[in-house]
Image (cartoon, rainbow, N blue to C red):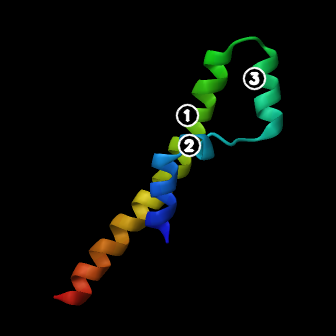
Amino acid sequence: MHILLLGAIWLLPQLAGAQCAMCRAVLESGGSNAAAESINNGIVYLMAVPYFLLAGISYIIYRKLKS
């Protein structure tokens, strides 16, 4: 299930571009679209890290149980 979600995020980056409406309004009202894009990318990266950690730990546990 997580693999499908990650695949959708990689294939459809506009899905990963969602963020808090208030944060987006504040950043875009400042006139700097570069800052808004940077904040948005940071949110996506921070959201992805726990999934990669969970996948890595799950793989290690799977290998330990298999051997």
Q: What element carries label 3?
A: helix
- Say which label, 3 or 2, has the lower sequence index: 3
**What is the spatial separation of the Cα atoms under label 3 and label 1, in whole angstroms?**
13 Å
Tell me: 15 left or right of 57: right
Q: Which amino acid does label 3 sit on?
A: Leu
Q: Which of 27 and 1 is in front in this view?
A: 1
- Mark 1 is surrounded, within 10 Å at the Cα level, by few (under 14), some (14 to 19) or many (20 or more) other residues, namely some
Q: Residue 61 placed where, x, y %?
A: 31, 79
Residue 60 falls in which quadrant of the image?
bottom left
Amino acid found under the numbered disc labelled 2: Val
Q: What residue occupies the far front of the structure in this picture? A: 11
- In this picture, is 28 found above or below 20? above
Q: Where is residue 49 in the image (x, y as percent from the top left)?
A: 46, 52
Separation of disc 3 and disc 2 at Cα?
16 Å
Labels 2 & 1 near each other (Cβ < 8 A): yes
Residue behind mark 3: 27
37 to 63, vertically: above or below: above
Query: Viewed as shown, does residue 19 lie left or right of 37?
Result: right
Nearer-N-terminus badge (3/1): 3
| Alpha carbon distance from label 2 to label 1 | 5 Å
Where, quadrant-wise, is the C terminus in this rendering?
A: bottom left
Q: Residue at x 64, y 19 (%)?
A: 35
Name the amino acid type tagged 1: Asn
Q: Residue at x 49, y 51 (%)?
A: 48
Near mark 3 (Cα within 10 A), the count class, few <14, some 14-19 or many ≥20, is: some
Q: Name the residue under label 2.
A: 44
Give the residue displayed 46% in from the left and 47% down from the top.
10
Which residue is disc 1 drawn over?
41
The image quadrant that residue 13 belongs to is top right
Left or right: 40, with 30 as reference point: left
